[in-house]
């Protein structure tokens, strides 16, 4: 899996024995953006808590794991035994807000539905509001019985026992972390989700299927970009027709080309009228 799919990854033994500042330094180095002090403090808090919670465990941990379809990153993903834990932290918070629960739930759904190795394994979304009052959070699978657990709440004190309980609940063969992280990620973004991800700096390769479709999309986008440059240099007008079956990525190609030429300071800056035709009609 490419490095930009996460900012930091290590087996738990390495993570538990590495200095906090070394881990934070790697997170900062691999980030595509300038890191604010508040983010560094957040990483420090997450690392310190997780070193207590995961002491003695075997597995692998990932910080800032990319969810390209949503243009966001999961705070932490941990693989232990037969379970992929999806952790969303709200450091200093004493409430489990609906928005935060939906956030970690969306992350878990994305992995379960679009990440091939996660289709048949246990995925456990946990929301950690570190200062919330202790409460019993039931562990239950979804009605689809697809090894996806309903969102689980925890605080700084209950996180470790909650992980222990989940591991007892979810029996199965240990997950091969190397195979899991290298697995096919095949999202099918809506036009709005694709636009959000592209404007957030992700590429067409990141938010499309990682198979032949991704190759076709990349080559098509590159060819249109070449035609744009050729037309500009030779003072010509060009029209490009992109065809394909529904879901092939025609809209994604159009959005990708448009976002790549949106910089007004670039000599190839353009304004693109964009039409998408279907059997039922057309939309601008």
Image: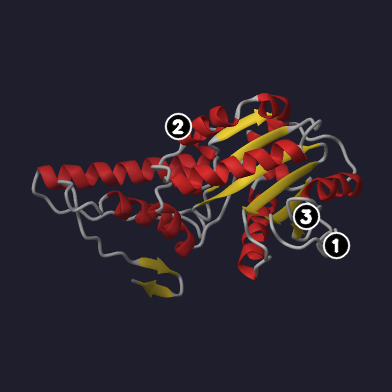
Q: CA distance from mark 3 to mark 1?
A: 19 Å
| Res 183 → quadrant | top right
Give the number of the mark in front: 2 or 3.
2
Question: Is 3 located above or below residue 185 in the figure?
Answer: above
Question: Label 1 neighbourhood size at 10 Å, few (<14), some (14-19), many (20+)?
Answer: few
Residue that carries the numbered disc 1 in the rendered image: 136
Local secondary structure at mark 2:
helix
Q: Label 3 near label 2: C-beta < 8 Å?
A: no
Residue 21 vs 209, above or below: the answer is above
The mark nearer the N terminus, 2 or 1, is: 2
Q: With respect to residue 9, does 97 lie above or below?
A: below
Where in the figure is residue 219, as x and y percent of width and height?
38, 40
Tell me the residue that label 2 is attached to: 29
Spatial distance from mark 2 to mark 3, Cα to Cα? 33 Å
Pointer 2 local density, CA inside 10 Å: few below 14, some 14–19, many at least 20: some
Q: Residue at x 75, y 59 (%)?
A: 153
**Disc 3: CA contacts within 10 A as few (<14), some (14-19) or many (>=20):** many
Q: Position of residue 60 (x, y in %)?
A: 71, 32
Query: Is 7 on the left-hand or right-hand side of 138?
Result: left
């Amino acid at each position: 899996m490419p490095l930009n799919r996460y900012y930091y990854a290590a087996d738990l033994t390495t993570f538990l024995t590495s200095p906090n500042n070394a881990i934070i330094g790697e997170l900062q180095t691999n980030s595509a953006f300038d890191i604010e002090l508040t983010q560094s403090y957040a990483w420090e808090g997450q690392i310190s808590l997780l070193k207590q919670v995961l002491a003695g465990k075997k597995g692998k941990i990932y910080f800032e794991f990319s969810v390209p379809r949503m243009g966001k990153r999961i705070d932490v993903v941990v693989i232990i035994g037969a379970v992929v834990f999806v952790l969303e932290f709200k450091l200093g918070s004493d409430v489990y807000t609906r928005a935060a629960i939906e956030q970690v739930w969306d992350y878990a759904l994305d992995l379960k539905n679009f990440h091939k190795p996660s289709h048949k394994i246990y995925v456990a979304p946990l929301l950690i509001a570190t200062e919330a009052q202790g409460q019993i959070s039931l562990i239950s699978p979804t009605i689809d019985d697809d090894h996806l657990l309903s969102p689980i709440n925890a605080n700084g004190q209950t996180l470790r026992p909650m992980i222990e309980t989940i591991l007892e609940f979810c029996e199965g063969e240990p997950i091969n972390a190397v195979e899991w992280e290298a697995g096919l990620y095949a999202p099918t973004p809506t036009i709005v989700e694709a636009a959000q991800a592209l404007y957030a700096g992700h590429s067409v390769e990141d938010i499309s299927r990682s198979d032949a479709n991704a190759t076709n999309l990349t080559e098509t986008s590159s060819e249109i970009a070449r035609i744009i440059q050729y037309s500009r240099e030779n003072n010509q007008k060009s029209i490009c027709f992109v065809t394909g079956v529904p879901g092939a990525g025609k809209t994604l190609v159009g959005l990708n080309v448009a976002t790549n030429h949106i910089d007004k300071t670039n000599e190839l800056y353009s304004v693109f009228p964009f039409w998408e035709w279907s059997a039922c009609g057309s939309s601008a």
